[in-house]
Amino acid sequence: MFIHKEDQHKSLRRTIATIIVVTLLPAVILSCFILTSRPSPSFLFSILYFVLLLNTNIIVSAIHMIVLGIPAILIGMWLKVINWWSCTITGFMIGAVPQLISSWQSLSSFGWSDFLPVAIPGAIGGFVFWFLWRYWVQDAEPKIDSETTHPNNSL
């Protein structure tokens, strides 16, 4: 079997781009949510606060992707269960579980409003991952050249 090198590189580039987009998207959504949920004294303060939030959320989102997201992608590929609902649920869990673990001590005062702001962007990120995976990355999957695999086509 012969797999074209260009197709392998194209698929790898698209996979990396998808992971980057899915890392940045929840960070942007959460930063916008936090910024709009708190009144700010001035426009300049809002801009600076948003930049600070975005930088912090990108770091947290990247850690989530490295520790939880990439293993989830690999397991999903291995089990062949990458579909819209499994990616959405997995993204929701990747956003919610670390928040639940970090708030374990104060569960008596813990409610939906404490983890939904991080779980919903995770679910959106999971859905966007599936969408890009299905309609962009898989389109670049390596194709096997049947002409070069035929035994009579040898040198």
Image (cartoon, rainbow, N blue to C red):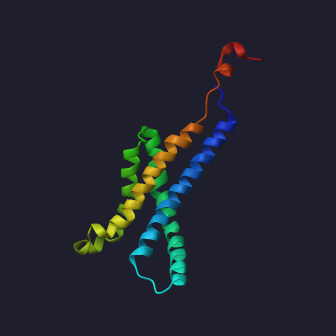
- Residue 106, position in %: x, y? 27, 75
Query: Is residue 139 shown left or right of residue 89?
Result: right
Query: Is residue 80 shown left or right of residue 135?
Result: left
Count of numbered tags:
0
**Outermost residue to the right:** 155
Corner quadrant of residue 48: bottom right
The residue drawn where x is 59% and y is 52% is 17
**Outermost residue to the left:** 108
- Residue 38, position in %: x, y? 40, 79
Which image quarter is the N terminus in?
top right
**Outermost residue to the top:** 152
The residue drawn where x is 67% and y is 15% is 151
Q: Nearer the viewer, residue 100 or 111?
A: 111
Q: Is residue 43 visible?
A: yes
The residue drawn where x is 52% and y is 71% is 54
Corner quadrant of residue 112: bottom left
Q: Is residue 100 visible?
A: no
Which image quarter is the C terminus in?
top right
- Residue 97, position in %: x, y? 35, 61
Q: Nearer the viewer, residue 41 or 93?
A: 41
- Residue 91, position in %: x, y? 40, 54
**Outermost residue to the front:** 43
Q: Nearer the viewer, residue 153 or 58?
A: 58
Relative height, residue 102 to residue 136 (above, below): below
